[in-house]
Image: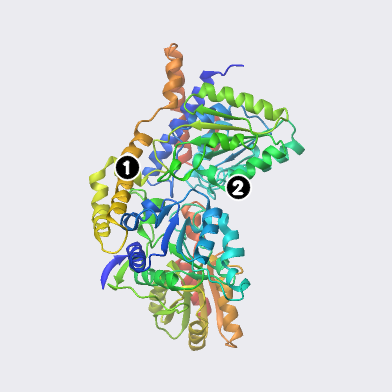
Amino acid sequence: MKSKTFAQAIDMALAQAMADDPNIIILGEDVQMLRVNLFSRFGRDRVRNTPISESAFVGAAVTAAMAGLKPVVEVMLVDFIGVAMDAILNHAAKVNSFSGGKWQVPLVIRAACGGGYGDGGQHQQSLWGWLAHIPGIMVVVPSNPADAGGLMLTALEHAGPVIYLEHKLLADYWLDYMGIGDRKTVTFDVPPNGARGPVPDKLSPVPPGKAAVRQKGSDISLVGVGVGVHRCLQAAGSLKTKGVAAEVIDLRSVSPLDIKAICESAEKTGRVLVVDEDYREFGLSGECAAVIMEAGIRAKYARVCTNDTIPYSRDLEEKTLPNTERIISAALSLMS
Amino acid sequence: MQPDLWELYSLMYKSRLFEQAVKKLWNDGKISGEMHLAIGEEAVAAGIVSHLKEGDAMALDHRGTPQMLMRGVDPVSLLCELLGKPEGLCGGMGGHMHLFSEQHLAASSGIVGSSGPAAVGFALAAQHLRPGAVAVAFFGEGAMNQGMMMESMNLAATWKLPVLFVCKDSKIAITTVSSSVTSGSLFNRAKSFNIPAKEIDGTDVEMIWLAAHKAIDEARRGEGPSFLLAHCSRPEGHFLGDPLIRITKNPLKEMKDMAPALLKSILKPKGAAVRERTESLSSVTSILGQTTKAQFFNFNDPLDMTRKELKSDKNRLEQLEEKIEQEIKQIVINALNGNTDNKKAVT
């Protein structure tokens, strides 16, 4: 175990996998600079810069994967995935079904996601619920360095298409590019244990669809992914001083969803609060409620999500994204 | 018709000082997120926007502050928007990449290439509702490889829409040298849609004004779209704090973090052959060294060129510059105070 940054752990996982499997290639905008360590070791054929042509290179990555390669295709920010949506929605996600389960698309789509640094609503979305809505796609959202590495290996080992989302408050280089820009005059609410943490010397994959209980508790279940997990842990600390024992569940993957972990916790505490940086309606938070109801569990339920387009202004953004105060207040309402 | 160089210089100088003020406010931490300045592109903006009138539309990219300013958007509310204030043009909801002014039919987007379809739609509405009006799309050369940009050109040409496609060619898209990911010439690409195209020095505001005059005039008369390929550089990089510029300006400091991991990775067993690894390394150093220097430091300033022509009337030039400097100072003060009502005092 060594302490590594979130970004170093992803690089490490990719290096480990690329050394073992020559069919793994990286392609995307600026990847020769963004992944300079991998570029210098694996060369230009395996780390390919693309033009700003998402619909073409994501679409091409789908069939490259069908024909034997294992592409890790980068679209920079998940917001930009809109341009390539047809390749994902109508192709990557469908090929396995259309072929009667006979043809696989072992593709990883990697993108930065999330807000909290004042960059506006076209660069700070989460979108994991929107993407996970499509059958046939795995969507993973790590919350710490060990999982960032582990889930990248999970994604690379998975037989089908995976969307791998790294939050910009956790991946230091993204925050540096997009938020800090070499300034000492700006501050961000970066979860320290998410941005840096212990990483095993040799990474192994996280089982797909397996949540992690980050803190045990018996009064209320706080469920989230990515940065949301850290906001939950922080809220759980405050709730403890008010005599409330919160359980914190890190889903780690949005699809497949660890229904068992959600239901077990819901059954135990009888109160579920979903914290989701993605949009509130028709997404992960509603899905969590649905699986609990489908299991016939009686639990009180609430959610703290992003309800609207993310504002540019830091003040407005702070109120829009789930924050610890909103989580505490929603948790206390569920307790009363 | 000939351009009024005084007017154009005034637009460019005001935009330059405005963006320099933005740079300072960003450095002071008063503006959040990324900041894509258009310093170096002022001649393209001024030479084109100065032709626009009521009913004309602008589709802008992530670098559209000068166009908004030159089109007549209240500068205090524009700066308030960048500062994320409720008094801002969009109430602090948009920021510099998402500037909108319905009054000016001006819309921006941070999605590369999206100004193509946006301009086509504005032009379609013009064809129906405002005959004689035009729409301008501003974008970088990186956007020319987006499918939607090429689709937009085809649509505009097929429907003879009044669109002026303006490509600001800086030769580099973030850290990717555009020629390394672009086949053929952009000029010929536009021509292949039967769109009249002109390649132009993007620092020569007079030439840009003349080219735009012809293209916009034709569009107003229903003769369809045109394409302008304007070469210009952006010395501030892709955005403020651009890592390429940081490394080039301060290699020892920046490489201290980068070099050990790079060295370790390049020496690892399993991977590409030594020759390929060396090639990767030299490609990285080339981007960091020569390319970056050429792109950012050999800056051909569009303001200098015009200023030289106006220097013969030194007094008038000094007075004009002094007036604009005072104006910008007042805009910054008013914006920091959220004082948009005071705009009358500064115009």
Image position, residue B202 (x, y; %): 49, 29
Label 2 Cα crowd, 10 Å radius (few <14 / some 14-19 / many 20+): many
Label 1 Cα crowd, 10 Å radius (few <14 / some 14-19 / many 20+): few
Pick whichever, A287 or A257, lies toward us: A257
The answer to which quarter of the image holds residue A13 is bottom left
Residue under label 1, please give it.
Answer: B286
Image position, residue B247 (x, y; %): 30, 44
Pick whichever, B179 or B109, lies toward us: B179
Q: Do labels 1 and 2 share a chain?
A: yes
Task: Give the chain of mark 2.
Answer: B
Image position, residue B289 (x, y; %): 30, 40
SS of the residue at dot 1? helix
SS of the residue at dot 2? helix
Q: In this view, does A187 lie to the left or right of A73?
A: left
- Mark 1 or mark 2: name the one nearer the start of the chain: 2
Does A282 appear above or below B188? below
Q: Residue furthest right?
A: B128
Image position, residue A184 (x, y; %): 32, 49
In this rendering, does residue A246 appear at all? yes
The label nearer to you, 1 versus 2, is 1
Task: Give the chain of mark 1.
Answer: B
What is the CA distance from the residue labelled 1 to the residue labelled 2?
A: 31 Å
Amino acid type, residue under disc 2 in the picture: Met
Residue under label 2, please give it.
Answer: B148
The answer to which quarter of the image holds residue B238 is top left
**Residue found at x 46% / y 45%:** B181
Q: Is residue A37 left or right of residue B86?
A: left
Does B219 appear above or below A212? above
